[in-house]
Image (cartoon, helix red, strand yellow):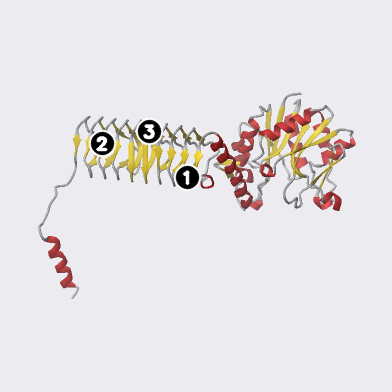
C-alpha cells in the first residue's frame, strides 16, 4: 500500500477563542490554520484530503476547497468525527492520517516518519504521534511495553500514579491502516462520563484484536494545539522563528531577527539584508541583493535585484520594483511599476502609476489617482525628472526625459524632453512683514 489520505478534524466551534469565526479559520502569518495544515500535507501527495466540519460551516468549506468535506452532525467526540469521514474513504487502500485543524505547526517530516512506521509491518494497525513536553500537565499518557509497542492511551483523569509519571504524551495525531480503520472505529463505544466516542480507544481495541500499535515522537513546538488567543500568539511566534531561521540559512541577513515578521509565502533571495522592524504581508518576493531598511511595511509587492526600500517605506499590493530601484523614507507605492534605476527618495505617494527607467521623483510628489469615484493612471517616462512638491493629476503622461519644475500641478500631457513649470506669479512687498508685526503689537496693548 502506498496511497495516503488525510482526515482533518475541523468541526470545533472554538468557544475559547471568544470569536464568531470558526477556530480553524483564525490566521497565522496571513493564512488560516487549517490551510497551513493542508499546505503541509500537500507535500505528501495525498490521494484524498477530507476535512470534517460541523453543520453550517460554509466558510470553512470555502477555505479548504478543493478538499472534500464531511459533516459531523453532532459533537460526539473525535472517534465520531472520524466516523463521519468513513463514507468518503470507501474503497480507499493505503494509510490514513488523522490530523487536527487547530494544530497547524506539524511538519511534513514528522508525518512521513509516521507513515514509514505504519508501513514497517503489515501488523502495525495504528501509529500514534507522541511528544515529551517540559510539563506533561493533564495530557493523556502513552503506555508502552518492553518492546516499545504502544499498549494504551490513558487519559490523565483515569491514570494511576505510575501512569502519570510517564512523560510520553498523546498528541492525538494518528496514522491508521485502511485495512483496519472501519473495524476499529465501529468498535469505539461511548461508555464514559461525557458520553462521547474517543478516537484514543482504538489503540486498546487494536491490541485486543492482536494488532500492533506504534509510537513516533514529535517535537512539542510542532504539536501546539490552538484553543485560545494566547496559544494563537504562541503558534505565530513558533512559525515566525522557523521562517526567520529558514531565511537566514538560505542566504538572507536579518540584523535583528526577532523584530522581522514574515507572511506564510514571503520569498527572500540571496544576500538580501533586512534591517530591524520590517513587516512582510502576503504576496511578497524580494530578489537577490536587496536591502530593506528599518520600519518598512511590504505586502503584495515584488522588489528587483539590488533595489533599496526604506526606511519607513510602504509597498502596497501591486507595487513592482525593477532592478536597482530606490524607494526611500516615508514613500508609499501602490499598484505601480518602477522600472530599473528609478528613484523615489523622500516623502512621496506613487499610486496607479508607471515610472520609467532612471526617472527621478522629487520629495513630496504625489500622483493624484482618485477623483472620488474612479482611479486613473499616471505614466512617467524614462529619464524624466519630477521636481519636489509636484502634484500629478491622473490621467496624465510625462514624456521621456521631461523635467517638471518644483511645486507644479500637472494636468496635461508633457512632451518628451520638455520643461513644464506651473506656478502662480511671485509677488514681494518690501517692508510688509515689519509693518504687519508692528500693527499686531499695537492691537495687543
Residue drawn at x 61%, y 31% is 66
Label 1, label 3: how far apart the Cα atoms are: 20 Å
Which residue is the site of mark 2? Answer: 385
Image quadrant in which the N terminus is located: top right
Give percent across and percent down for residue 208.
Answer: 89, 37
> On screen, 227 above or below 68?
below
**What secondary structure is found at the residue carrying circle 1?**
loop
Image quadrant in which the C terminus is located: bottom left
Q: Judge by depth and name the residue closer to the eye, 308 or 42.
A: 308
Give percent across and percent down for residue 216.
Answer: 76, 37
Which residue is the site of mark 1? Answer: 278
Q: Which of disc 1 and disc 2 is earlier in sequence?
A: 1
**What secondary structure is found at the residue carrying circle 3?**
loop
Q: Which of disc 3 and disc 2 is earlier in sequence?
A: 3
Asked whether the beta carbons under mark 2 and mark 3 sit within 8 Å of each other, the answer is no
Q: Can residue 160 be seen in this view?
A: no
Label 2, label 1: how far apart the Cα atoms are: 30 Å
Report the residue that reaches farthest toward the bottom.
Answer: 445
| In this rendering, position of residue 232 left or right of residue 152 | left
Q: Judge by depth and name the residue closer to the eye, 28 or 145.
A: 145
**What secondary structure is found at the residue carrying circle 2?**
strand
Q: Which of disc 3 and disc 1 is earlier in sequence?
A: 1
| In this rendering, position of residue 312 left or right of residue 151 | left
Which residue is the site of mark 3? Answer: 324
Q: Judge by depth and name the residue closer to the eye, 86 or 367.
A: 367
Report the residue that reaches farthest toward the top.
Answer: 1
Give percent across and percent down for residue 339.
Answer: 35, 31
Q: In which quarter of the image is residue 437?
A: bottom left
Residue drawn at x 60%, y 49% is 233
Q: Which mark is residue 206?
A: none
Of marks 2 and 3, the one in the foreground = 3
Amino acid at each position: 500500500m502506498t496511497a495516503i489520505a488525510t482526515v482533518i478534524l475541523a468541526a470545533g466551534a472554538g468557544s475559547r477563542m471568544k470569536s464568531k469565526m470558526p477556530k480553524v479559520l483564525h490566521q497565522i502569518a496571513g493564512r488560516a490554520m487549517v490551510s497551513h495544515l493542508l499546505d503541509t500535507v500537500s507535500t505528501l501527495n495525498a490521494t484524498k484530503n477530507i476535512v470534517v466540519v460541523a453543520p453550517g460551516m460554509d466558510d470553512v468549506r470555502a477555505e479548504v476547497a478543493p478538499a472534500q468535506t464531511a459533516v459531523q452532525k453532532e459533537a460526539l467526540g473525535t472517534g465520531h468525527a472520524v466516523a463521519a469521514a468513513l463514507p468518503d474513504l470507501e474503497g480507499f487502500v493505503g494509510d490514513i492520517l488523522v490530523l487536527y485543524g487547530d494544530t497547524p505547526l506539524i511538519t511534513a517530516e514528522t508525518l512521513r516518519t509516521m507513515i514509514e512506521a505504519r508501513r514497517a509491518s503489515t501488523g502495525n494497525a495504528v501509529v500514534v504521534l507522541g511528544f515529551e513536553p517540559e510539563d506533561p500537565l493533564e495530557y493523556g499518557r502513552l503506555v508502552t511495553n518492553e518492546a516499545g509497542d504502544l499498549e494504551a492511551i490513558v487519559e490523565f483523569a483515569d491514570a494511576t500514579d505510575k501512569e502519570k509519571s510517564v512523560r510520553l504524551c498523546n498528541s492525538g495525531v494518528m496514522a491508521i491502516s485502511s485495512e483496519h480503520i472501519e473495524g476499529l472505529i465501529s468498535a469505539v463505544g461511548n461508555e464514559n462520563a461525557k458520553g462521547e466516542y474517543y478516537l484514543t480507544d482504538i489503540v486498546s481495541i487494536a491490541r485486543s484484536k492482536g494488532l500492533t500499535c506504534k509510537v513516533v515522537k514529535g517535537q512539542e513546538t510542532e504539536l501546539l494545539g490552538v484553543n485560545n488567543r494566547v496559544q494563537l500568539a504562541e503558534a505565530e511566534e513558533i512559525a515566525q522563528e522557523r521562517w526567520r531561521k529558514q531565511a537566514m540559512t538560505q542566504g538572507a541577513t536579518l540584523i535583528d531577527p526577532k523584530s522581522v515578521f514574515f507572511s506564510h509565502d514571503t520569498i527572500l533571495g540571496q544576500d538580501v539584508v533586512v534591517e530591524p522592524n520590517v513587516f512582510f504581508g502576503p504576496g511578497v518576493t524580494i530578489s537577490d541583493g536587496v536591502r530593506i531598511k528599518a520600519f518598512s511595511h511590504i505586502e503584495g509587492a515584488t522588489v528587483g535585484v539590488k533595489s533599496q526600500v526604506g526606511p519607513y517605506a510602504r509597498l502596497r499590493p501591486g507595487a513592482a520594483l525593477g532592478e536597482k530601484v530606490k524607494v526611500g523614507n516615508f514613500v508609499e507605492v501602490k499598484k505601480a511599476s518602477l522600472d530599473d534605476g528609478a528613484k523615489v527618495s523622500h516623502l512621496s505617494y506613487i499610486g496607479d502609476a508607471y515610472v520609467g527607467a532612471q526617472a527621478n521623483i522629487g520629495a513630496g510628489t504625489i500622483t493624484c489617482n482618485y477623483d472620488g469615484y474612479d482611479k486613473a493612471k499616471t505614466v512617467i517616462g524614462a529619464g524624466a525628472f519630477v521636481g519636489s512638491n509636484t502634484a500629478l493629476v491622473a490621467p496624465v503622461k510625462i514624456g521621456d526625459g521631461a523635467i517638471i519644475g518644483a511645486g507644479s500641478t500637472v494636468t496635461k500631457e508633457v512632451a518628451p524632453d520638455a520643461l513644464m513649470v506651473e506656478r502662480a506669479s511671485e509677488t514681494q512687498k518690501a517692508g510688509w512683514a515689519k509693518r504687519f508685526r508692528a500693527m499686531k503689537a499695537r492691537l495687543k496693548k
